[in-house]
Image (cartoon, rainbow, N blue to C red):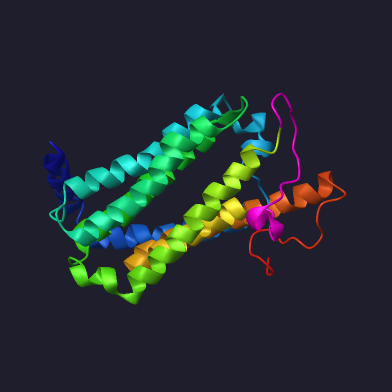
Amino acid sequence: MLHYLDSSMNRILAFLGFSESLFHEILKYTMIGLGIIVFISLFFVTAGYGRYISKKWGPQIDNKLGWIIMEAVSPILFFIFYIISEQKTQIVAIAFLLIWEIHYIQRAFIYPFLIRGKKEMPITIVLMGMVFNGLNSYIQARYLFHIKPIYPESWLLTPFFIIGTTIWFCGFIINLHSDHILRNLREPGETGYKIPYGGIFRWISCPNYFGEILEWIGWAILTWTVSGAVFALWTAANLIPRAISHHRWYHEHFSEYPSDRKAIIPFVL
């Protein structure tokens, strides 16, 4: 059935006058343009979830359920595109799959259940997240497993893969550790926000975002693709404005907030 979906997608594209490689190129550069728009927009409009939750974003659902629905798109679609490819037994393809799935299984099926307290998330945010995750999973997986020529096994020993994977792993650990610190700020029964300390919080207000940006910079390097670079740019475009908003919020709500902390890039921004 999955191979039927693959051939059906190609027939639809052919009917519309596109080869998949051309469609992929158009979609990829469209995403770059949209990323620039998102980056600029988020300096004027704060996405309405987390501490910025607002009724103006429309109906809301439990944020744990929202995270699962929104993030599950990525590991499921990426795995489907891997399964229907002819590279299932290729060691490099398996490595890419594992790296992607480690992040998104944690994000979709572990992280939501670690969230403390009962909060809500606008359905509009969930839907936008699903659309982005679906498009991005297509862009990444179809290029790696279908459009691009097969990576030789020797790719695993190249500086691109070794350096990129190291950066990805460092970002992943920073992201997990920072989330752990944030979850454990409050004692049982406490509410409200506190100033986080420890780890990379010593230098920046949003090390969880910094870690995620590092992950996808690492991904762009270890795959050495424009598609990977598009994802890294999108991640930065989405998280840098939000980190600046967080940083400003901390200073507005805590007079004792450390003045030497930056927002998201140590010693820089």
Of the pair 27 and 207, the residue shown nearer to us: 207
Range of magenta residues: 187-205
Residue 32: percent from the left, percent from the top?
45, 61
Of the pair 258 and 15, the residue shown nearer to us: 258
Which residue is most to the right? 255
Q: Quadrant of the N terminus?
A: top left
- Residue in the image at 76% along x and 47% along y: 249
Main secondary-structure element of the magenta-colored stretch: loop
Q: Is residue 202 magenta?
A: yes
Question: On screen, 200 above or below 162?
Answer: above
- Residue in the image at 60% along x and 30% along y: 116
- Residue in the image at 76% along x and 45% along y: 195
- Residue in the image at 74% along x and 27% along y: 190
Residue 125: percent from the left, percent from the top?
53, 37
Would residue 220 appear left or right of 116 to someone viewing this image?
left
Residue 239: percent from the left, percent from the top?
58, 53
